[in-house]
Amino acid sequence: MKSMHKKRKLDAVIFHVVACVIGFFMIYPMLWLLASSFKSNETMFTNTYSLIPEVFDAATNYMNAWEGVAGVSFLTFLGNTVFVTVLAMVGCVFISLLAAYAFTRIKFLGGKFWFSCVMVTLMIPSQVMVVPQYIILRRLNLVDTRIALVLPWFFGTAFFIFMLVQFFRGVPKELDEAAEIDGCGKIAILFKILVPVVKPAIMTASIFAFYWVWQDFFQPLIFMNTPSKFTLSLALNLFLDPNTYNNYGALFAMSLLSLLPALIIFIIFQRYLVEGIAMDGIKG
Amino acid sequence: MKKRMKKLASLLLASAMVFSLAACGSSGNDADGGSDSSDGKTTIKITWWGGDSRHEYTQALLDAYTAENPNVEFEATPAGWEGYFDKLSTQAASGSMPDIVQMDYLYIATYAKNGSLADLSEFIEDGTIDTTNVDDATLNTGLIDGKMAGIVAGTNALAVTYNPEVLEAAGVEAPTDDWTWDDYIALNTAVSESTGEESALTATIGPFGDMNFFNYYVRQHGETLFNEDGTALAFEDDSITADYFQMWADMASANVTPDPDEQSQIATLGIESLPVVTGEAGTTLEWNTYPNKVVASNPNLKLALMPGATENNAMWLKPGMFWSVSESSKVKEECAKFINWMINSEEANDIIMAERGVPISSEIRDYLKSKEDVDQTMIDMFDYVDKVTEIAGECPAADPGGIAEINKAFNDAGNSVMYGQATAEEAAASFRTQANEILERNNG
Amino acid sequence: MKNKVKEYKRRDNIAGYVMLAPWLFGFVLMYFLPMLISIYYSFTDYNLLNDAQVIGFDNYVRIFTNDDTFWQALKVTFIYTIFLVPLRLAFALIVAMLLNTKHRGLGLYRTIYYIPSIIGGSIAVSIVWQQIFGNKGVVMSLLSVLGINQEVSLLGNPKTALAVIILMGVWQFGSSMLIFLAALKQIPGSLYESAMVDGAKKPTIFFKITLPMLTPTIFFNLILQMVNGFRVFTESYVITDGGPLDSTLSYVLYLYRRAFTYFDMGYSCALAWILVIIIAVFTVVLFKTQNNWVYYESGGE
């Protein structure tokens, strides 16, 4: 019994040592960003990879970051980003769920064709899509509106549909067949039976969706004109011109501030990842 | 069979839509530039690239103009350098360019030749844009195919920036106006030996990253880089290119100038932290605006003429950037008035403070120099332009279409010599083949 | 599948399209039409500023017969994908298994491991990577301590720069890890319990239960990472900008340059569709193999 206990302790020590070593490599750039956001502009690159600021100037940097850029405050950018991200994420996850359900559980005419369309959208580089998208958005009078940033995500994206399809296929069909016999409709089956089972996948999808929309740069760059409607990733770009004096301190402070919400969302959502769902009871 | 027909029909329908969409893209009739509204107010859409401080003062500039001219309002789109032209070309594709556009010398010809930029000659002729104090050679850099595609926002000229303290510590004399490339190499070798660091920097991009450096070198030989219609290289002697490559490669292997590897490290530092500013390097090849840009980090940097600047009128005054008006704009005259104000009014230049380059109006230059609180670096910058004006030759024609691709080919060719993958002669020949192919494809 | 006659129930057709409708709407508007437009562009000489001129297959012909950079970019992208996909997946799976145990502080580790994926292509990352692998960076110092003195840094050397880019891709294993974690959580605990009761050893449990149950996710991750590998852009853009000497020039970075830097949108679209075909071929092949190794609880198709 005692040796068992000892072994478990040793296990834990090894685990934490390995996990911490990996962790250091993962977190170093984040720490560097944090440290750099405390450095004064003049000493920013004198000892670049040191994590300890020579001249501590966090107050100026964060004040500058908070004031924002181009006369628009940080909070405005944050508000825009939250608006776009939340709307896009909710739409994306919900509509992807419906589509994934249709693809896996319903046999309908053209299903395979549309699924291959999903796969093609996964493959085409977005760089050649943005000009036609811009032309269409202009036709719809949506250029320079936040809706333009929501639209490409809101109706679901290939990644999520494909991901949820894979997870649905991992769920035994007996589950929904049993429910169907009990008289459940398709919508009820999806939300009452399948969704709880693939909850970790949905949480994962939500985390990804949030982060992707949050940091998306290229589409906002092309679609938006007015600084007061800019998202954070676009605002950060406003700091940078290789041929003029750059306010790196404020840039790094703002980068860090803009990463925090994505990190917080992750910390909140990841708790749900842990909750495994027991399918045991239902599975024959 | 029926199913097939249906499929075919829907496909046809879809493609019809596509074509109508794609076609509407390039026609300019649905432009959404600025407008004259019925209450007599004019809205001007304006865009520029820059960093934090440029956005701030440009917004102040617009506000000042609106205060003076209450009938004019602005819709400003500030942007970072990255993606600025991606966005502009997308807007051009759908006929929705802003009215006033900050334009770079690299791209002005491409935009002008495709009819995206308005011809401003009429506004110069009728005096809306007053150019009496502007040097003709400078003004005409905006002239493309006989049309005035942009008004120069500020000029600059190639210059050597040096750090007097570093030179002094190494015990070398500051460069004189008649120094040569040999002097340049000797000076930097001496500094490098004393500091143990590479002394001869070339901006953040290296000696091959900006065609202007090479263009200067070609002009020193009394030759021209590109032919008139931009379809081929104009100079014929590949030994010019090879000598240029070899000169830098030799300096790199003697640790007098950074190799491409070290160069990419330097590029991440940003202009204000280059070794010449921090006192690790003696000189850098840059534009004459450089010391003034980094005055906050080091106010002591000095300008010297380029090595061999007096040979063959090799120097020229280059437009730093332009103000252009889009062809699709409906308020061209108001735009012209605003551009005139930026160029000629003391009030505007009190705000701009030569941040976009040396003002093109000689009167404004004198005015700024006479101001009390002006930095020494700014006076140096202006004096340098005066000095260059005396010895300068004609400004080379606006960069031909495909310049970005040529620049890339040149950079790769030069770096391949530095990496020892090709001899200078091979690289020079390879550059010629590539450059001519690109030029022929783009402008032929 | 003995009888190939397909039967679609009318009710299922309606249900299917009702549930697909929202996606279909967005798809047609934001993806399908733009795709058709870009196909059209690929047959034109179009620089975004002029009126597109239809030139037939000229762009495609030029790509295959007169463009060395195309082949270079293709080569870089293949090497990147071939190394990245297995490395990233293996690493993600190992870490996910590690985190699927009962220890303290798992949430913290999960968060930390996901951080690289969050800060992805930001300017901070590009500076840090250049500092670490650049010529005065930590890695160079380490190498010289080990007695390996190199003239150029790993990032500045055309022979090694791509390896650094691949390493960066592996470093961002966070999203694959999360997907594996989600899948591991979905494996019914009862399976393990009964195996334990039967006295199975850990490796046996892994190969007999965990791995088969994970195959749909591995398959998904495999497809996804392959597609992402072929479409790699950010890493080579922010760290090396394709250099030195095109040694890290990814395919998408090249087509991006064609479109927006070299004003060659028609050509760029042609490049894009060639890439789609390449990826599609690999995807179809992978889909065909899945019957041999992917195990679906729902009984496949």
Image (cartoon, coloured by chain):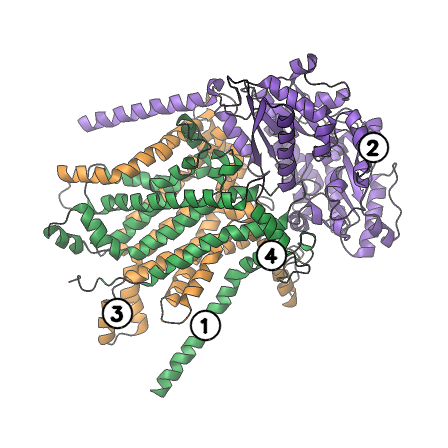
Chain colours: A green, B purple, C orange
Label 2 Cα neighbours within 10 Å, binned few <14 / some 14-19 / many ≥20: few
Label 3 vs label 4: CA separation? 44 Å
Number of callouts: 4
Q: Amino acid at mark 2?
A: Ser
Label 1 vs label 3: CA separation? 25 Å
Name the side, left or right, on which B50 lies relative to B155. Answer: left
Give residue C129's position: percent from left, percent from top: 57, 55
Q: Which residue is mark 4?
A: C133
Q: Nearer the viewer, residue C43 or C170?
A: C170
Relative to B324, say whether A282 is above or below: below
Q: Are marks 2 and 4 in contact (CB under 8 Å)?
A: no
Q: Amino acid at mark 4?
A: Phe
Q: Nearer the viewer, residue C100 or B365?
A: B365
* Subunit that carries the residue with mark 2: B
Label 3 Cα neighbours within 10 Å, binned few <14 / some 14-19 / many ≥20: some
Disc marking residue B370: 2
Give residue A102's position: percent from left, percent from top: 23, 43
Res. C246 in view: yes
Label 2 vs label 1: CA separation? 68 Å
Give residue B193's position: percent from left, percent from top: 82, 55
Identified at 62% across, 37% down, the residue is: B55
Q: Nearer the viewer, mark 2 or mark 4?
A: 2
* Subunit that carries the residue with mark 4: C
Identified at 27% across, 43% down, the residue is: A99
Q: Which residue is mark 3?
A: C192
Q: Which residue is mark 1?
A: A16
Name the side, left or right, on which C200 lies relative to C118. Answer: left
